[in-house]
Image (cartoon, rainbow, N blue to C red):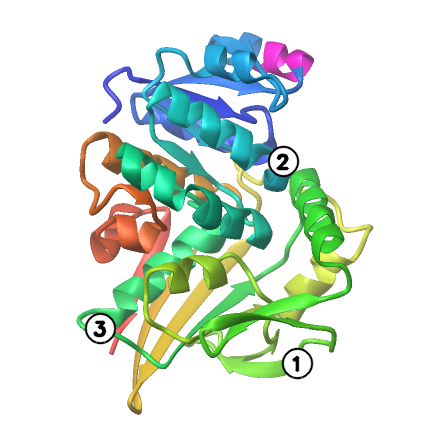
Amino acid sequence: MGSGQLVAVFGAYGHTGRFVVAELVQRGFVPVLSGRDGEKLKALAYETCLEARPATVGDPEALDRALAGTAAVINCAGPFASTTGPVIEAALRARIPYLDVAAELEANIDTFAHFADRARDAGAVIVPAMAFFGGLGDLLVTAAMGDWTEAEEAHVAYALSSWHPTAGTRLSGAVSRERRGERRMRYAGGQWEYRTDAPPTLEWRFPEPMGTRQVIGEFTMADVVTVPSHLPIPDVTTYMTVEAVRDIAAPGTPAPAAADDSGRSDQTFLVDAVVRSGGAERRAVARGQDIYAVTAPLVVEALDRVLSGRIRRVGVASAGEMFDAPGFLRALAPHITLELLP
């Protein structure tokens, strides 16, 4: 447990940031609230009786003050294309671990590309995409691989009962679309491809009782960055149920609404990860409630393992490479129900 260690949370007042702050407190850490909006920080500090340290990504000295004396920093502030670089730089200056919950493909690609050498040389720990998208899928694929040293393809299919996006999700999506224009991304043959055609609509056979559902194929999420960052799998594809895609694409879809005292929505999810090699197939399945809320136990479990030295390497690494994937996933109970299938 946290034993009172200070942990900076940048973007603490956002939808996901609030879940992260609550999870940190529950596990014995002391969050230090930070972010760009001083008024929102002040309100959250009053509500939680926690210290607030305002900072903007354009002010390195303010970021240094925000991280001073903390054991680590968790970045929850999107769009991550703007925040990851400056907050990682501040973490490197402070010589503390950095974790984020970024789902933006480009932001995660940039983190691996720009900070891998520096973090390794400094003995620093940087864990990007430690969230529902990116971290969870990577852990499931890694666990499904088991003793395989390579695979021909990995597939991660998402079945969401609905997808009411936060304002941050919409803003991050807009930033990603601005960066890549009308193109979409997929990972095939061991490299990134940019395509202008529409992604295919397919059928995916989810585990019972869900069964076969229509999905958008090549609906590329952060898992397609994290998985091939450490696993020799040349084709990595993610899929999303068509109902969830319709929800997030519709401008009138409302933000998530709390359905219980913890603030979770009534959204449910099933993540089906399949790896194939030489005609054989292995599968790992996770079920749970609220993709935003479940990010909090994911990133705080990662934080706890980093600070207690239960890591497999230093430098920039995804969840599946940094941690023992099966053990990590089992530690997420009761937030996630896990099945490992042959």
Residue at mark 1: 200
Residue 164 seen from this side:
yes
**Separation of disc 3 and disc 1 at Cα?**
30 Å
Quadrant location of the C terminus?
bottom left
Which amino acid is tagged 3? Thr
Q: What stretch is highlighted in magenta?
A: 38-44
Q: Is residue 18 visible?
A: no
Can you tell which mark lies on residue 82? 2
Find numbered disc 1 in the image and state the secondary structure of the residue it sits on: loop
How many residues crowd mark 1 within 10 Å: few (<14), some (14–19), many (20+)? few
Asked if residue 57 lies left or right of residue 146, the reply is right
At x 68%, y 51%, the residue is 176
**What is the quadrant of residue 161 in the picture?**
bottom right
Q: Could you tell me which secondary element the residue under label 3 belongs to? A: loop
Q: Residue 99 is drawn in which quadrant?
A: top left
- Name the residue at the right extreme: 252
- Compared with 197, 20 (above or below) is above
Work out whether mark 2 precedes mark 1 in sequence or the reverse, and give the earlier one: 2
Mark 3 or 1, closer to the camera: 3
Q: Badge 2, how many Cα within 10 Å: few under 14, some, many 20+?
A: some
Residue 313: give x, y in percent of width and height: 23, 45
Is residue 156 found inside the magenta-colored segment of the image? no
Give percent across and percent down for residue 198: 73, 76
Horizontal relation, residue 249 to residue 87: left or right: right
Q: Identify the mark nearer the N-term, 2 or 3.
A: 2
From mark 2 to mark 1, how far is it between C-alphas? 31 Å
Q: Give the residue number, with chain letter if any, for mark 3.
A: 149
